[in-house]
Image: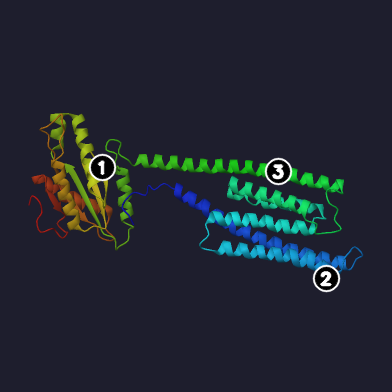
Amino acid sequence: MAAEPNETPHVNEIQKEYLRIDKDWLSLHYRISIGMVIFALIVECIMGIILVHSDMLSTTVPRYVFKFILVPSGVNALCIAINHAVVKSGKVSQTAKIYTVSIINTVICFSLFTAHSAFSVTYYVFVTAVILTTVYASYQVTLCTSVSGVVLLVISELFITWDLDKPTIFQSTLRLGNFLISLFIMFSVSMICMVVIHYERRKNRASIRIEEERVTLKKRLKMDELTGIYNRKALHDAMRDLEDCNPRDHYIFGITDIDKFKNINDGWGHQTGDKCLIAFAQLLKNSCEKAIVYRYGGDEFCLIFNNTDINEAYEMAVLIQDKLKKIKFKEHPGLQMSASFGLAQYESGMNAARLFMSADQALYRAKITRDTIRVHEDEIVPEKQKGG
């Protein structure tokens, strides 16, 4: 568990959830294709039985079974096999899987329409393939599916004569009318799906934008306006989280402040004092790669070192002290800063208030001599404590 406040925007999680939804729908889309094939086979068998026992059958039973049951079912089975191989493949991207399942669904519709186009209702089977793509909220997927559906419909109607008893659109005005109406419906449904996708995408973008604004506002509430680092509220949240951290994690809590800061304010002015605070805060932030820095109040700052031992934290404090002395202000060449540190080691189950008090007591002892680093007396102290 990290000591840094939990301010990671949830936008990535929202986008990941959208991808999970697409993945779930892809799986359902694939199963719907299987269901269509199975349902069509059952209907074809039932119709075959009815036709065989009636006087409507105009061909032999074997020929009927071959043309209207075996061939369409074989083509559809091949489509399902391709779908299965693509959907289950770990080497094919999510986008490629979506396109494959959508296009193959139109091929299944083409197979069913070509075999049973004598029934005018089969004209509209392509519409289902288009509608099923709207969940992906992708203009390209829906447009590609719609265009492929129209092309396959035209090919089947104009260039393939599977059922010899079926009149062509050039022989039947009624069939021509149905064909033209089906094209109009395909176009209309495609446009409606595009509009639905447009508003669905707008809704998704709005939800992400609102979440971004919420997270930004929440983060601002935990940032110190003057120094740009985390404030006391963020520190309280981090200290609370420490109590629930993994016992195997190691944390060092430190408190530091600028020596004789009141004298800086009184002698150089509060504006200069603010510049000192900003410079010190940036030094702490840039120097502590393993620590999160918080402004507790005034010139007092807190640090939470993650997975760091007391010696490493101590050496980091020494480095900060050295760098702080090198900070110069052009308008105030005589101004030099120093800082004192109090460090305490977190132990599993330790109360956050006790940890803070331990570091505060160490800082109090460091302030006696100033420009000093002190470790809480109950901890393992480095061999040489600066200033001691």
Chosen colour scheme: rainbow
Q: Residue at x 85, y 56 (%)?
A: 166
- 152 relative to 327, above or below: below
Furthest-bottom residue in this view? 62
Picture quadrant of residue 225? top left
- 232 relative to 53, above or below: above
- How far apart marks 3 and 2 lie (CA) works out to 39 Å
Residue 326 numbered mark, or none = none
Q: Nearer the viewer, residue 44 or 110?
A: 110
Where does residue 262 sit, x and y in percent of width and height? 15, 35
Q: Which amino acid type is shown beneath numbered disc 1? A: Arg
Picture quadrant of residue 300? top left
Where does residue 59 sit, x and y in percent of width and height? 87, 66
Q: Which residue is mark 3?
A: 187
In primary-sequence order, the first of circles 1 and 2 is: 2
Q: Which residue is mark 2?
A: 62
Residue 295 numbered mark, or none = 1
Q: Which amino acid type is shown beneath numbered disc 2? A: Pro
Q: Residue at x 65, y 57 (%)?
A: 104
Tell me: 294 left or right of 99.
Answer: left
In primary-sequence order, the first of circles 3 and 2 is: 2
Q: Nearer the viewer, residue 144 or 384?
A: 144
Tell me: 215 left or right of 189.
Answer: left
Q: Nearer the viewer, mark 3 or mark 2?
A: 2
- How far apart marks 1 and 3 lie (CA) works out to 62 Å
In primary-sequence order, the first of circles 1 and 3 is: 3
Where does residue 289 sit, x and y in percent of width and height? 26, 50
